Image: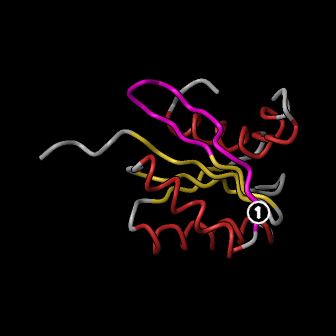
Amino acid sequence: MPEPAPVALGFDYGTRKLGVAVGNRLSGTVRPLATLPMRPHALWPRIDGFVEEWAPAAMVVGLPRQADGRTGRVGRGAQAFAARLGERYHLPVHLLDERLTSWAASRAPDPAGLDAVAASVILADWLGLPA
């Protein structure tokens, strides 16, 4: 039986926008894909398309935490989103503490793509690759 594909999708969850990135552990690459509005009727078809196109073996969702480590309202939303991904796509979904990823992503040249870049930082961290 062949090993599962080394591809993963990463998500930077927010209340208004969702950043999406794709990464490949074997090639050592991660790249931002899109920043999507958090409108369910438009969101899920786009994610369906990314899953179909990239055939990921896993998904990673950034878990926003407060400075003291507690999970607030947005963090609970990210946990619910991660659970929905797992139910919908029947793939392993991992949560990763995303503190400081927005700061790292703020170096992106295109502010409109900040959320997608933050998703790539989250995913690179999970894959053990440089951001």
Q: Is residue 105 above or below residue 10?
A: above
Colour approach in the figure: secondary structure
Picture quadrant of residue 63:
bottom right
Position in image of residue 118 (x %, y %)? 73, 41
Q: Which residue is depicted at the point 68% across and 65% down?
A: 78
Picture quadrant of residue 37:
bottom right
Position of 126 with respect to 117 (left or right) is left
Picture quadrant of residue 105:
top right
Q: Is residue 29 above or below residue 123?
A: above
Q: Which residue is depicted at the point 28% across and 46% down?
A: 4
Q: Nearer the viewer, residue 131 or 36?
A: 36
Q: Is residue 130 above or below residue 75?
A: above
Position in image of residue 119 (x %, y %)? 67, 44
Q: Which residue is depicted at the point 51% across and 31% down?
A: 128
Query: Label 1 sits on what residue type?
Result: Arg
Position in image of residue 31 (x %, y %)? 60, 33
Position of 107 with respect to 101 (left or right) is right
Name the residue that disc number 1 marks.
Answer: 70
Position in image of residue 107 (x %, y %)? 84, 27
- The question of residue 29 being in magenta is answered with yes
Q: Main secondary structure of the magenta part?
A: strand
Q: Which residues are magenta?
A: 21-38
Q: Is residue 5 above or below residue 89?
A: above
Q: Nearer the viewer, residue 64 or 120?
A: 120
- Mark 1 Cα within 10 Å, few/some/many (few <14, many 20+)? few
Quadrant of image for the C terminus: top right
Q: Which residue is depicted at the point 43% across and 67% down?
A: 89
Position of 14 with respect to 57 (left or right) is right
For the image shown, how many numbered marks are present on the structure?
A: 1
Q: Secondary structure at mark 1?
A: loop
